[in-house]
Image (spheres, rainbow, N blue to C red):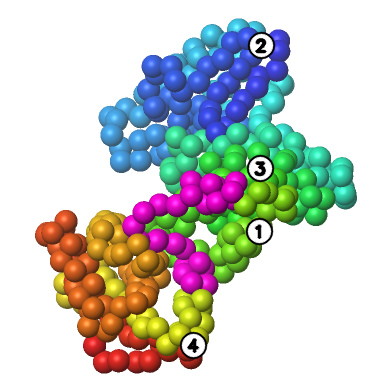
Amino acid sequence: MDALKINMLGEFSISCGSKTADGSLSRSKKLWTLLEYLVAFRDREVSQNELIELLWPEGETENPANTLKTLIYRVRSVLDELGGMGGKEMLIYRRGACSWNRELEMEVDTDIFEDLLKRAEKQEGDARLRLLMEALEVYKGDFLPKTALEPWAVPLSTYYHSQYLKASYEALHMLSADSRYGEMIGICQKATAIDPYDEELHYWLILSLYKTGEQQQALQHYDYVTDMFYSRFGVNPSSRLTDLYKEIISVTKTSQMDLSIIKEELKEDYTPGAFYCEYAIFKDIYFLNMRTIARTGASVHIALLTLSGLGGGKPKQKALNRAMEKLKDAIGLSLRRGDVYTRFSVSQYLVLLPSASYENSIKVVERIIRAFRQQSPKAAVTIKYSVQPMTPDGINPVRQ
């Protein structure tokens, strides 16, 4: 008989030769829960009482012992369909306990994953990296994703996930040290699909795109990540990520180009209306305006708009996200082409108003608030603002 091949990472399936059984078949969830549990604890006998508590914790069945026997019979029927040794011989049920046949040859992806990581610990250099990358290849996804929230599965899922992240970080560090950025992209894309909220992985993906000449993709992914963290968690990107962003946008083309070609390229990137940018760019524009003020004495004002709940507290995150998007639209519609704005925090926007007096700047902000209210008349938020003139030394405070 061919060895049973069992996948538990990313999906649950059992294969023998060319035949496979998985949860996509129209069988009950309890059947697959039982099979998954027995595979997960395949190295010991599992008592009848333990299985009953697993499957019917609230006592939903009148005769759990008989119901369990029926379910075990159905599990064995699934195993029968794989051919080779019969399900009754593969899954032993006697003396009130269930266990796998000790003589049954099984290849389980979690075992392979752990074995590769243990072997990697004993190696160094290229041999260590090769084993780490083999382990990452085995990890198709988190442990039993359809069952991952069950109390018994949570510790196992957490353990394998943490081992995967640890191996990913180490492999990425080693590849980066050798400037193997192309290989890093694949690892990062897979890892961010498995754990989309790990900023470290996104950092490495943006870096590897940047280092392979895909600056535009790197910047697009940075925008995606910052928007995701704003809307999901209400947090700003780390300084490490914003520093990488500034490095990417500061890169200049090294090849010589005709000025007319450069002008055409700049024209293609030009968009009408107010300029929305990341805070890192906003700061550079701010400092540029400070120099202009020192040289010409021009009038430049900066405005801060802050969203809060009706009672002064923070709105619920979902409501805040919607309101911030609407406020962004209102700012963009209300400003002139020469004005610049950015998201300063989870609930604030900064607006730079060159060539505007204090009175006109106040009018601009009030126009923004009116536009917001027209778009979102029922939004349960208030907008507070302050406007201050800039000086060559920074901000000259003015009472609002």
Query: How dense is the environment of label 1, judged by Cα within 10 Å: few (below 14), some, or many (20 and up)?
Result: few
Which mark's residue is nearer the viewer, 1 or 4?
4
Task: Characterize the magenta stretch by its predominant secondary structure.
Answer: helix
The earlier-in-sequence mark between 3 and 2 is 2
Which of the 4 quarters of the picture holds residue 395? bottom left
Q: Is residue 96 above or below residue 267?
A: above
Position of residue 171 measured from the top left corner of the image (x, y, whole percent):
74, 48
Q: Is residue 81 above or below residue 146?
A: above
CB atoms of marks 1 and 4 within 8 Å = no
Q: Is residue 342 visible?
A: yes
User: Which three-letter amino acid code belongs to the residue tagged 4?
Assistant: Ala
User: Which three-letter amino acid code belongs to the residue tagged 1?
Assistant: Val
Residue under label 1: 251
Which mark's residue is nearer the viewer, 3 or 1?
1
Q: Is residue 323 visible?
A: no
Which mark's residue is nearer the viewer, 1 or 2?
1
Query: Could you say whether the residue bearing mark 2 is in a helix, strand or loop?
Result: loop
Q: Which mark is residue 294?
A: 4
User: Which three-letter amino acid code belongs to the residue tagged 2?
Assistant: Gly
Q: Which mark is residue 34?
A: none
Of the 4 image quadrants, the one containing the C terminus is bottom left
Residue under label 3: 185
